[in-house]
Amino acid sequence: MKSKLALVPFLCVPALVACSDDDDDGPAVTTIGASLDALGLSTLDTAVKAAELDDDLSGTGPFTLFAPTDAAFAALPAGVLSDLLDPLNQATLQELLLYHVVAGEVDSATAAGLATATTLQGDALIVDAVGGELYLDDARVVGADFLADNGIVHKLDKVLTPPTDLAATLTARGFTTLVGALADTGLDAALAGPGPFTVLAPTDAAFAALPAGFLAGLTLQELSEVLQYHVVSGRVRASEALAGGLATTLLGPSAVFALDGDTARVNGVALTSFNVPATNGVIHVLDAVLLPPDLPALASNAGLDTLVAALVAAGLDDDLAAPNGPFTVFAPTEAAFAAVPGEDLAALLEPANQAALQQLLLYHVVPGSLDSGDVLAAATLTTLEGSDLAVTVTPPTVGGADLVTLDVGATNGIVHAVDAVLVPPGFVFPLRAERGPRAQPSEGAAPGSAGDGLDTALVRTAGWRSGGEVLSGGSLEGLRLERRPDGALRVDLDAAADARAVEVRLTGTGLDALAATLVPAPGGVPLELSPERVTRTRDGAWQLAWSLPARLQAPELDLVLVPGRGARIDSLQLGLR
């Protein structure tokens, strides 16, 4: 290089990923300057000679050259390359080429651990590793580690451009609609300021894909809000955004970043290019316009698919949508819903159990927009369901569930993710209404429905709830419920002789001393069987289970429940298989 140019080393940060060499072994080379044509970089070789930098790239070095391929030069807008090669523009060409060179010899594995690299032109390149690929600014390394006597060459799929400020970069890159909207709202001045900012920039095609008249129908305030949702404070590289998952926009609501295979996305929208450099920030290019999300939309963006499905099934998606609110939602993660027994979750999502699902979901919602500081400053929080959630600080929990993600903003509230489904006090998961023939009540059956919609061929289920001393509820054909004088409950299952297993779920108070016995009577001789399994569920219910070996199949089965002194059975659910 020319002696007047200082050699500036890479700025190193902890390693991210290694970049593999996509090419086979290259030809034998001498210096970088003498090897370009042999490496298939004929356009770059022509440009280097036109800039009179060929002797410099054959100097002592060592240098690292990020070399645009011939295809990269061919992809430049029409007329740009010829203008650069014009002798009148030699200084501009020199500046552009020197932006592709850094001092020192850095292989691809080492480069993958860098955040920036200062070029011989003077500005810093953004170095990033995304999806197993190495990037310099918005260019991908397509061939790596070609050694020369005085350094190393890596091939790029784009020509790098020295950075200008964000506003000028957007204009130069052809974001005509975005630039016009920024000017209309006065936000262009901010993007020409010191920043730094990260701009999520929709292309002109992205704006054109909006519904007809949508953009023109926005007030300047509404347009400003949409644009502010596309700007994040600070210079955030693509890998940093993907690692963080969430980014708070200037508007307030969060944008959700995720890697979908090899495709980087924000709110599900693909980043068609990223890490476009600017002197006061960075630009990531989008193929769609982002709209600020309300709470249901934010849950969808964040991949909380089960919660979204539950809100729709409960008919609460519109209630939690803008302009309603603000609300604070403690959102169970996908793993939290996966921990709920499948039958319970399936039952909750059935239309017949919508009221129970609404009760459960409203127990996750608190009025007002409470950030993590507000939440952890409270001892209890009253939910829209009406019950209170207990809050602890160490560890941070709400309703006994760990807070795993905090302060995810929406236009009408805020979301905190929790690692468990919260269950209101006294809540009983409903039974699943299997499809099948409707059972009819037998003589002496408890009053109430006859087990509408229950599948009497496969799974027989029934449930009762007591109100004071009066029992009401459901019955299958031949199934009777009675209260004995000693206070015990007896369930007569004489039509269930083909049952192989019995499971009971109970809620109430003082049930620790409950005695439960299943009494089959094979050949008329009763046997008393204690439950094989007794568990306490997260919602406070007791579950008891029995299996019946084939030799015990009996024409009659009785379930006898004897509460202890002062105990009360509030609800009973029974499953026969």
Image: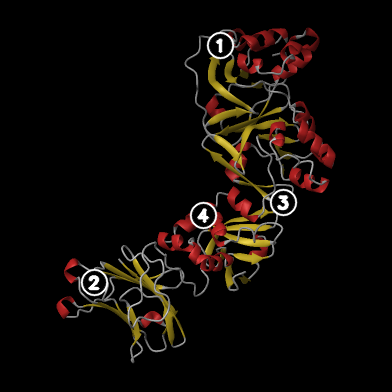
Q: Mark 2, mark 3: which one is toward the viewer? A: 2
Mark 1: amino acid: Leu
In what element is the residue under mark 4?
helix
Of labels 4 and 2, earlier in sequence is: 4
Marked residue nearer the N-terminal end (3 or 4): 3
Point out the frontmost of discs 3 and 1: 3
Residue position for label 3: 252
Q: Is residue 176 visible?
A: yes
**Amino acid carrying mark 4 in the image:** Thr
- Point out residue 476 in the picture as x, y percentages from the top left corner: 35, 73
Q: Which corner quadrant of the image does residue 108 belong to? A: top right
Q: Which residue is the site of mark 1?
A: 39
Residue 39 location (% of width, % of height):
56, 11
Q: In this orientation, which residue lies closer to the viewer: 550 or 195?
A: 550
Disc on the earlier residue, 1 or 4: 1
- Give the residue drawn at x 52%, y 32%: 132
Mark 2 — residue? 497
